[in-house]
Amino acid sequence: MDTLTRTDPADMLVHSGLLTDLYQLSMLQAYHFHRMREAASFELFFRGLTPERSFLICAGLETVLQWVQQLRFHPHELHWLASTGRFRTDFLRMLARLRFTGDIDAIAEGTPIFANEPVLRVTAPIIEAQLLESRLLNLIHFQTLIASKAARCTLAAGDAGLVEFGLRRAHGAEAALYASRAAYLAGFSASSNALAGLQFGIPVTGTMAHSFVQAHAAEALAFERFAAANPEQLVFLIDTYDIEQGAYRAAAVAHTLAARGIRLQGVRIDSGELAPASRRVRAVLDAAGLTETKILASGNLDEWRIAGLRAVGAPIDVYCVGTALSTSSDAPALDCAYKLVEYAGRPTAKRSPGKASLPGCKQVWRSFDPSGRIQCDHIALADETPAQAQACRTEALLQPVMRAGVRLSPPQTLRMLREQCLQHLDSLPDRLRPLDAQATLEPSVSSGVARCLPREPRRSPPAPHGAEAQTWA
Amino acid sequence: MDTLTRTDPADMLVHSGLLTDLYQLSMLQAYHFHRMREAASFELFFRGLTPERSFLICAGLETVLQWVQQLRFHPHELHWLASTGRFRTDFLRMLARLRFTGDIDAIAEGTPIFANEPVLRVTAPIIEAQLLESRLLNLIHFQTLIASKAARCTLAAGDAGLVEFGLRRAHGAEAALYASRAAYLAGFSASSNALAGLQFGIPVTGTMAHSFVQAHAAEALAFERFAAANPEQLVFLIDTYDIEQGAYRAAAVAHTLAARGIRLQGVRIDSGELAPASRRVRAVLDAAGLTETKILASGNLDEWRIAGLRAVGAPIDVYCVGTALSTSSDAPALDCAYKLVEYAGRPTAKRSPGKASLPGCKQVWRSFDPSGRIQCDHIALADETPAQAQACRTEALLQPVMRAGVRLSPPQTLRMLREQCLQHLDSLPDRLRPLDAQATLEPSVSSGVARCLPREPRRSPPAPHGAEAQTWA
């Protein structure tokens, strides 16, 4: 992670303040104009879980912290803002100096989260806290989306291997890179994405493409040539023409290679009916004495197909998951929001139909049963004393990670975060683990939060200066 | 587009050769090792259209050309490759010098395309052509995905305005930026994404967030303060507490602003039942004499909801489309591929079950009827003379855009591409235009292409050196 500095050509984390919705800058200009400088607290949360997910795995905090620390407006960006005719000179001068000086509390990456739980809280002068909204959502939403999908694959795959193959149909470069990271975080063991290897230290892996086989006059010749140039971690792709014949040719080539000390580690199947194909390939390999040669499968795989193949005992050792993972294709977006919960010491919330939010700075208390499984979650005001825990163990999930713009601790390694995430997956209650789980965990909400909830909107005659925002209990 | 240079902090186009699947580099090493330097042609195409789309709009060519020209491996990347233990020193030395020196033919951005039509062809020494695969797919796939979704919104919106609001739930920074570009290309009139404004010259627009209203003691006070700081292109968000009361307050504030020469251009509704809400709001505004004040709607909109709102005559002037557009949520990925079609003068294709491809360098001929509508498409070998056109007008869609690594013409402006795309949308046959169109256009395939198709795979006993790749007619 330390390689993420702006001078690194591989660095894709955009630190420009302009990667935001224009209205953030218009609001900032109004706050600046009216000298509204008091502290605001915003919380990021997922409104409700999509029916396709019984839990989410939060991710993206590390990229957020790096971004926040380097966030700024560059001179040519300020020049462009001036050219729009919407912004005053004194405001742009303020923007040029703007740095994030606030506090962030957050739930650790890799932790299961549920509807309405604040994942991250920003407390800062309102100009700084508001400015973060668009990109903060963009970073946390996507990485949580992919980590949540990856976790389902991890549960489905059991002791089979999982490799992330999603670069080509990920939504752009950053999506490809962060999908690799989120997948690894949530239990994948490797990625095909070379840049993710350099940038995050994720193990990289790969085989060959059909074009390589096609570029040779014969499949076996392609195998031999590939092996001569790439003798390490050797995997042949055997379905360019006919899977079973490909397996025979791979086995024959493997024998000639063995004589030269080169070991065929695996074969990949990318098409056809994977269950019968993998059985035929296994039989061919075993008959040739290649019992240690693994079978990798790819081609429109997702957690459902992995579970189906495992259910019928397909002899597949490694599942390579691409598009379904890197686009979270069954649920390509989650309903998340970054909402003002307190301004100048006053709890606040919106009452918009269907989109009401919980006011006040909050904490999530998680209780575990004696076996270490999650028992229940409780959302309380951050300064409330939680109800007496009935559980074996209760933890406060939101922890301070930044104070006055400074990180409180150095980044954890991605490998460490992955270990913690795998432990978290073990802590999921049984009812949330099946791919088709209809259940989710509904956090309870404290009486303190409930007391801050806005009253019903008044239907009385309109008043231009109605004090509707003061109707908190 | 000219602002996209590597020294620009806003530049997010990744020129690193490492943004690729590792297997590309393994294959390159084998080609290098065995001195396979002959010309290869690869074609990028969409295999089949997803049921949710009756046509696609191709996009992303401009970003591809910029990327290809600057593609290279940086010293620290080569150092990392060496550290994996998979690559030889002479290969890495070659990679350090590698630049793209090949040819590209492509269909212009904004053109409707259909299944199996080559959108782009690369002809280059096989090392260069193979290296492009992963990122080329990544760039073209995503931008085509979004332009295709945006075109459906354009058809649904008719003469109403369309604004792209998708940054926060787009899959990362690059997705947000290219979604803005693809949406504008396919008929949106503006974006909320400030960086897209700087980078692509897309008109930017925005209103205010609920948090701005919440940060004030009263809604009307928030409106007044916002207007004082942002008098131009003024739009109030009126649904933070109650939509109808918000409309009354907006109207009242608009009257006091009018006295100061500030005009309320619009109000935005982001929640609730938009059809009845917009009617109530329209009535409030009209009763207050604000007949010119527009109504903007947002909140989980897509082409279906836009069509539904227009069908019931909801008085909405501008539709703001976010997540559904920037993630193409109903079809977040398309089945595209980049396949070797010729190597060393020999046509080639794969026969993998369900994934067979069309061999040979191809051209797409499009015929139009007398009214200028698309009549049919015909896929032929690039050197075939097309069958005598029965149509009023026939065009070859693939045109040379790069020769020997050099662009043949400077970039067209995005505005010009947008105009052309809108004309292309007018050329769509009526049967492809409804949102629920079950039809698509099936291109015919020439006898020349058919003659190059590989024969059925042989089921005869396996031969390690079978000449299966030579079985072309």
Image: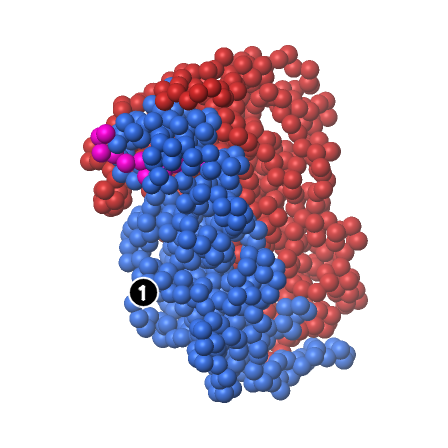
Chain colours: A blue, B red
* Residue B211 place in picture, x, y as percent: 56, 71
Using the rendered view, name the quadrant where residue A17 is placed: bottom left
Is B268 situated left or right of A268 in this image?
right
Q: Is residue A319 left or right of residue B95?
A: right
Q: Is residue A51 left or right of residue B249?
A: left
Disc 1 crowd rating (10 Å Cα; few below 14, some 14-19, many 20+) is some
Taking A73 as reference, is A115 above or below it?
Answer: below
The magenta span reads: A259-270
Secondary element type, mark 1: loop
Tell me, yes or no, if residue B250 can be seen here.
no
Q: Which residue is mark 1?
A: A411
Quadrant for the N terminus of chain B, please.
top left
Three-letter amino acid code at the position of disc 1: Pro
B29 lies above or below B301: above
| Residue visible at 20% across and 32% down in the picture | B90
Camera-side residue: A317 or B419? A317
Q: Which residue occupies 59% across, 20% down?
A: B445
B299 magenta-colored: no
Q: Nearer the viewer, residue B281 or B86?
A: B86
Q: Which one is nearer the viewer's eye here, A376 or A278?
A: A278
User: In percent of the image, x 77 and y 62: which residue is there?
Assistant: B276
> Looking at the picture, does residue A290 appear above or below residue B224?
above
Hey, which quadrant is residue B42 in on the image?
A: top left
* Magenta-span inclusion, residue A264: yes
